[in-house]
Image (cartoon, rainbow, N blue to C red):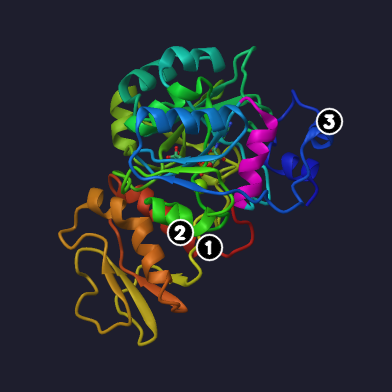
């Protein structure tokens, strides 16, 4: 699909950008990603973080740990550096990316905060909340990172290594999850290397991601406050901070969350959801031991004790592990829908969806 067409298809209310102009200026994404030597920082120090930050300032790509999942970071203000992210991930469309910053003051330079946005930022930043806001007049984040939209997604991560890297880079960092397009999000440095070794410059190893599931995305635009992506902060907590119920964007059609393409989180195996048994040739992803007594090729329980926080932390790693057995299908036990269960069920239904448009 040509760039201009793909931009228009996920930017229905785009009005401030000439998509053809952006298409002319955009680097050629058809070419192979640049071959890079990937350096792994196993024990990051201020000096090595500074070296990775210098690489970012020079337009390089650095995978960084965050409290949710590993992100693939580039200087958000550079079109060329951001283009490198899309190339390394083999991302077929220019989904808008989240810009990561160190604090609310830095965020105010890039976006406008209505009172609801202000309260959510104060309640949850630093932490796993992404706010979609009207871009500020002098927003420095590149058009490619914003996919030409006049809104912008901002997040202030809590992970100390992510914070140190953003601080040292001295620029907002655009960072999608550090996986190849269509694969599940990485929660360890090994996952990142399995997908991106030789395609990125550095990886900062911060151990296993604490939360294991991406940030919750809330849109605070002129049309009101709405949930674009369930994630690490449960909807109930957001509603408590707002003192009001949270609408779901686009009546569930997700038009305003272009990255929410159906097959975003896809293992190679097919998923059979809400399973009550395991077939002879299936692997099993269990929850709270519901499928435990069935014989199976490969079996993992997200949380034997039924703890949704533990289940979220294990989710992507377990999907990858079961997928690596090469089974055709994974039977997945039902996961309750409250708290972090909403985000887990959202990722499960995406992983089970047809593979038409990976992100
Ligand atoms: O936890 C996370 O959010 C991780 C870590 C690395 O921070 N990042 C992450 O990024 O999950 P990514 O690119 O995989 O997902 C970003 C989502 C996409 O669904 C994208 O469409 C949406 O944010 N997004 C970004 N800008 C947007 C905008 N202006 N309007 C609506 N959605 C937007
Ligand atoms: Mg992702």
Looking at the image, is mark 3 or mark 2 nearer the viewer? Answer: 3
Q: CA distance from mark 3 to mark 1?
A: 34 Å
Q: Which residue is mark 1?
A: 353
Could you tell me residue 112's position as x and y percent?
53, 14
> Which is nearer the eye, 14 or 35?
35
Which numbered marker is on residue 21?
3
Measuring 39% from the left and 63% from the top, which residue is drawn there? 319
Could you tell me residue 132's position as x and y percent?
52, 28
- Mark 1: secondary structure: loop
Q: Main secondary structure of the magenta part?
A: helix
* Label 2 Cα neighbours within 10 Å, binned few <14 / some 14-19 / many ≥20: some
> Which is nearer the eye, 273 or 91?
91
- Contact check, label 2 and label 1, Cβ < 8 Å: yes
- Contact check, label 3 and label 1, Cβ < 8 Å: no
Is 87 in the magenta? Answer: yes
Q: CA distance from mark 2 to mark 1?
A: 6 Å
Residue 274, above or below 152: below
- Mark 3: secondary structure: helix
Q: Quadrant of residue 60?
A: top right
Residue 138, above or below 187: above
Looking at the image, is mark 3 or mark 1 nearer the viewer? Answer: 3
Could you tell me residue 270's position as x and y percent?
48, 72
* Label 1 Cα neighbours within 10 Å, binned few <14 / some 14-19 / many ≥20: some
Q: Quadrant of residue 22?
A: top right
Q: Which residue is mark 2?
A: 349
- Mark 2: secondary structure: helix
Could you tell me residue 123's position as x and y percent?
31, 22
Which numbered marker is on residue 26?
none
Which residue range is magenta in the image? 77-89
Q: CA distance from mark 3 to mark 2?
A: 36 Å
* Label 3 Cα neighbours within 10 Å, binned few <14 / some 14-19 / many ≥20: few
């Amino acid at each position: 699909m040509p760039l201009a067409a793909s931009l228009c298809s996920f930017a229905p209310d785009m009005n401030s950008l000439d998509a053809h102009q952006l298409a002319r200026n955009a680097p050629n994404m058809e070419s192979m990603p640049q071959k890079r030597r990937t350096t792994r920082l196993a024990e990051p120090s201020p000096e090595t973080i500074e070296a990775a930050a210098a690489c970012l300032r020079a337009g390089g790509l650095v995978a960084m740990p965050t409290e949710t999942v590993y992100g693939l970071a580039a200087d958000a203000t550079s079109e060329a550096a951001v283009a490198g992210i899309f190339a390394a991930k083999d991302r077929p469309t220019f989904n808008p990316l989240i810009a990561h910053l160190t604090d609310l003051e830095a965020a105010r330079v890039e976006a406008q905060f209505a009172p609801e946005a202000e309260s959510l930022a104060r309640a949850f930043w630093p932490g796993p909340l992404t706010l979609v806001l009207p871009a500020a007049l002098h927003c420095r984040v590149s058009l490619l990172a914003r996919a030409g939209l006049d809104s912008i997604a901002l997040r202030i991560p809590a992970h100390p290594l992510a914070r140190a890297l953003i601080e040292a880079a001295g620029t907002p960092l655009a960072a999608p999850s550090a996986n190849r397009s269509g694969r599940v999000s990485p929660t360890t440095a090994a996952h990142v290397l399995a997908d991106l070794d030789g395609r990125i410059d550095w990886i900062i190893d911060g151990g296993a991601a604490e939360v294991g599931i991406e940030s919750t995305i809330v849109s605070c635009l002129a049309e009101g406050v709405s949930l674009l992506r369930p994630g690490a902060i449960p909807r109930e907590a957001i509603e408590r901070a707002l003192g009001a119920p949270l609408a779901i964007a686009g009546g569930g059609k997700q038009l305003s969350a272009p990255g929410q393409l159906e097959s975003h989180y896809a293992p190679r195996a097919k998923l059979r959801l809400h399973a009550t048994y395991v077939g002879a040739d299936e692997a099993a992803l269990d929850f709270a031991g519901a499928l435990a007594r069935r014989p199976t090729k490969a079996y993992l329980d997200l949380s034997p004790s039924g703890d949704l926080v533990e289940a979220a932390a294990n989710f992507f790693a377990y999907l990858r592990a079961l997928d690596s057995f090469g089974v055709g299908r994974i039977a997945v036990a039902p996961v309750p829908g409250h708290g972090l269960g909403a985000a887990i069920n959202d990722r499960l239904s995406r992983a089970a969806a047809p593979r038409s448009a990976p992100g």
